[in-house]
Image (tube, rainbow, N blue to C red):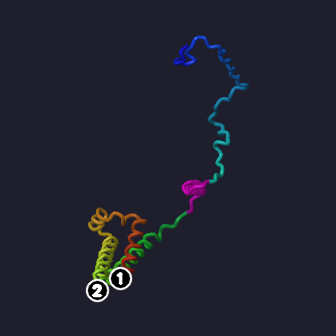
């Protein structure tokens, strides 16, 4: 041969054919499936405690173990009252922010303080409009300032307003 053809293509190979491996016969017949008997437990179906190295795995383990516990009865009769008190406190805080900002604006301060006071005034007005629960106002706020309807982003907005009011 000239060395360009593969060895398996050459007809004069001296290697013997592979020996077939016998397939073992099953020793016993599996039992018939019965719907009235409970399923046998195995290592695959048993819930074993797992250890995780990452945050997502530990959160999922917490969720899985929390869902196994029976739920406690939660008394939600006070919830409307708590929400109403929170709305009043938000309105009071926004009103105070507006009042302090306007007092700062009346004094004709430096331009940077004046701009910060305007930001605080508009932020306070935005919170007041949000907490009034008027449908036509909430619709326009939802269209233009939708982040206020997410609790995390609303918290960040409140932190921004606190830092703005701290700045002047």
The residue carrying pointer 2 sits among few (fewer than 14), some (14 to 19) or many (20 or more) residues within 10 Å by Cα, namely few
Q: Residue at x 55, y 63 (%)?
A: 73
Q: Which residue is mark 1?
A: 168
In the rendered image, is residue 112 in sight? yes
Q: Residue at x 63, y 53 (%)?
A: 51
Query: On the image, which quarter does residue 34 sit in?
Result: top right
Q: Nearer the viewer, residue 7 or 65?
A: 7
Evaluate if marks 1 and 2 touch, with contact meaning CB atoms under 8 Å apart: yes
Q: Residue at x 60, y 57 (%)?
A: 69
Residue that extends furthest to the right in the rendered view of this protein: 27
Residue 140 lies within the magenta run: no
Q: Main secondary structure of the magenta part?
A: helix
Q: Is residue 57 above or below residue 93?
A: above
Locate the C terminus by quadrant: bottom left
Locate the N terminus by quadrant: top right
Residue that extends furthest to the front in the rendered view of this protein: 2
Q: Is residue 132 above or below residue 11?
A: below
Residue 69 lies within the magenta run: yes
Helix, strand, or loop for circle 1? loop
- Residue 120 coordinates in the image, percent (x, y): 33, 77
Residue range (magenta): 52-72
Label ID, residue 109: 2
- Residue 111 coordinates in the image, percent (x, y): 28, 81
């Amino acid at each position: 041969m000239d060395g360009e053809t593969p060895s398996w293509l050459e007809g004069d190979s001296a290697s013997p054919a592979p020996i077939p491996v016998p397939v073992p016969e099953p020793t016993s017949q599996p039992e018939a499936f019965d719907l009235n008997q409970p399923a046998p437990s195995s290592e695959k179906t048993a819930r074993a405690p797992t250890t995780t190295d990452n945050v997502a795995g530990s959160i999922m383990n917490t969720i899985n173990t929390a869902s196994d516990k029976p739920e406690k009865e939660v008394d939600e009769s006070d919830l409307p009252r708590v929400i109403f008190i929170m709305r009043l406190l938000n309105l009071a805080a926004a009103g105070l922010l507006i009042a302090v900002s306007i007092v700062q604006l009346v004094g004709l301060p430096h331009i940077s303080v004046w701009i910060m006071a305007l930001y605080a005034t508009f932020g306070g007005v935005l919170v007041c409009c949000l907490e009034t629960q008027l449908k036509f106002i909430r619709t326009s706020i939802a269209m233009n300032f939708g982040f206020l309807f997410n609790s995390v982003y609303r918290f960040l907005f409140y932190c921004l307003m606190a830092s703005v009011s701290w700045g002047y």
